Amino acid sequence: MAQSAHRWRNTAAVLGAAGLLSLGLGVPGAAAAGEPRIDLRVLVVDNGDAPVQAITAQLKSTGIPYTTVDLTDADRPTVTAAFLSDTVGGTPRAKFQGVVLPNEAPFGEGSAEQTALESYERTYGIPQVDAYTWAHPGVGLDYTSEGGWAGSLDGQQASVTAQGKSGYFGYLDGAFAFEDNDPSVPESYGFVARPRTGFTSYVDVPVPGGSGRGSLVGEYTNDGRRQLVVTFAYNQYQQQFRVLARGIVEWLTQGVHLGQARNYFAVHVDDVFAPDARWDTERNCTPGDIDCVGGGGEETPPIRMTAEDAVRAAQWQRERGFKLDMVYNAGSGEEWKSENGGTDPLATQLLADKAQYRWINHTYTHPFLGCVQDTSTVPWSCAKNADGSTRYMSRADISAQIRDNHNWGVTKGLPLDRTELVTGEHSGLKTLPQQPDDNPNLARALADNGVKWIASDNSRDPAQRPVGAALTVPRYPMNVYYNVGTEEEMADEYNWIYTSAADGGSGICENNPASTCLDEPLDTATGYDDHIVPLEARTALGHAISNDPRPHYAHQSNLAEDRTLYPVLDKVLADYRALFADNTPVENLAQSAIGTELQRRAAWQSALAKGSVTAYRIGNTVTVTAPSGTQIPVTAPQGTVKQLLIGTTAFGTPYAGERSAWTTPGLLQTALKLRLP
């Protein structure tokens, strides 16, 4: 990476006696005083197509500031020399460190705007990404009729070339497949073509029906300009874009930019020590639920881990190098023990292995902490006080649930963080449609117990938000149900939810615009492994490789009986490790660290939106100013150091071949200064 940064630096322009001169590929001995200022901001020229929007989403997620020129807006600014550059304090300034275009010439070849942009790129050595274009000599490729190919890339195996691995795509192991989620629907069209002089392929694929390999992503250097040429269509959710997104952005910024991106995966296991109710495959409901009528009550045996299941959980963690978060209900475990002879081998085993897990408070007995539920109707409603106001669980009762569970954990020596909490069913927080507001007593009870991070359900409450002085940590529900212990039960309930009434299902999928019905019911003997596991693993992996730190959650029942959770987790981790190099490990964060990451991101985006961040590079020095106390995310090459008032210190931590961190200016400094290698 240091070599690439050096190349980038040498393409900068200097101010000559006759004005700005294009430097081409380097000017030996250029003085730092003559180097221009390059603002750490990206220009995005948007025509509304998915590829540009995908790259824009990656910029935003990473925390890179950008300016959008919307080609569909009649009132958009005109791209001129003055729009792109100016002079600050006598130093020439390039306002953008990189340019994202929908194709190689969106303003039209030879037009005034296109000419201004190309001149700007030559003068300051600014890279350009062509988000999606066709194969032709104008971008350094042969026509597809000359030994290439054009068509659907679904299911094709692509590879990162040796040049890609030695550059900004070196975080990938090498090979990846284009998605083919539905054989009846073309999902990704592309042009596979042979490079010409001046073109270096970074990602290629065997030419379908032909010989040799053709490029899909590569760099074209011509006429003093550099373009990253992408010749396949994509959107921000497709896996082939997700695995390449980091490399595209790092190439665009030459590995020096505000913001950071990492891959995250954390899994919470709720209801530890408590039993979970079991799905009734005859009545298609869960006994104990208020909408499950007939049959005489909870006659199906509940699902609860055994000591053997606990042994397997610890073994699985060691084998996979991955830590689970055990979200526990101590009171429910104590109730189980008293009802079962006063012993609990499960608790004994989990406590023996307590140091191997992270532990999170899930309240003592898992009650509903929101409004008092009136179950005389289906669905339930919130009970009312005499004056018509909503009746809520009290502050004292909520606080006791949090306190008693935490204290039990302390007496058992659990490694706990008292600032973390997951309430049963995420209760206490708003629950639509019955309870549109948080329980007003919840925030006070959280403060009573020092809780700063409370879990919410990302499917219902996706944005981090305050609950009094605490903040939510949205969690992704895994489509591995809490009320099943076997694969057949899982497939049976899945069929009930996702098949039409005509096929024997509930018909929910027909009435929910966000859902899709199965073509036919799954075979309950094979449907879990053949359909549900691949689908759920793909969804979870998509979150993990999207710079999304939100945790996923399942339940202790999924580690019992058929242990339905492991096949999903195994596939997520195996697929991840097949895609990414060892220098890009998945980040497995605790709930408090995830909450902090989301909090910092929100503050950073707010600072960018207010225009209160200034960041630029002159030569090998990066300078960033932001509001006092703001945590600043920065990514830079290996070897970068942070300038202190006296001396320097190493910057950041290594990830994906670079270094990145949230940081602030040094002591007695008003600006963050980094020295690049």
Image (cartoon, helix red, strand yellow):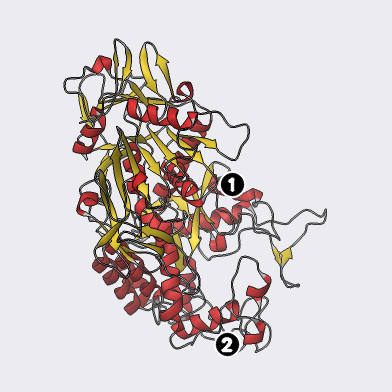
Frontmost residue, 620 versus 608: 620
Identify which amino acid the numbered label 1 is placed on. Ala
Q: Quadrant of residue 570?
A: bottom left
The residue that appears at 40% across and 56% down in the rendered structure is: 232
Task: Give x and y (percent) for residue 554.
Answer: 46, 67
Identify which amino acid the numbered label 2 is placed on. Glu
Quadrant in the picture for the C terminus: top left
**Residue farthest to the right, as pictured:** 387
SS of the residue under disc 2: loop
The residue that appears at 49% across and 57% down in the rendered structure is: 475
> What residue is disc 1 on?
443
Frontmost residue, 388 versus 188: 188
Does label 2 or label 1 sit earlier along the sequence?
A: 2
Frontmost residue, 360 versus 111: 111
Task: Give x and y (percent) for residue 593.
Answer: 39, 47
Frontmost residue, 570 versus 74: 74
Label 2 – label 1 distance at C-alpha: 38 Å
Q: Is residue 492 above or below residue 184?
A: below
Mark 2 crowd level (few <14, some 14–19, many ≥20, 10 Å Cα):
few
The residue that appears at 32% across and 68% down in the rendered structure is: 208
Mark 1 crowd level (few <14, some 14–19, many ≥20, 10 Å Cα):
many
Is residue 566 in view?
A: yes
Task: Give x and y (percent) for residue 476.
Answer: 49, 60
Q: Is residue 625 above or below residue 290?
A: above
The answer to whether the residues at label 2 and label 1 have Cβ atoms under 8 Å apart is no
Q: Is residue 586 left or right of residue 291?
A: left
SS of the residue under disc 1: helix
> What residue is disc 2 on?
299
**Residue farthest to the left, as pictured:** 29
Task: Give x and y (percent) for residue 343.
Answer: 39, 78
Q: Is residue 609 above or below residue 410?
A: above
Quadrant in the picture for the N terminus: top left
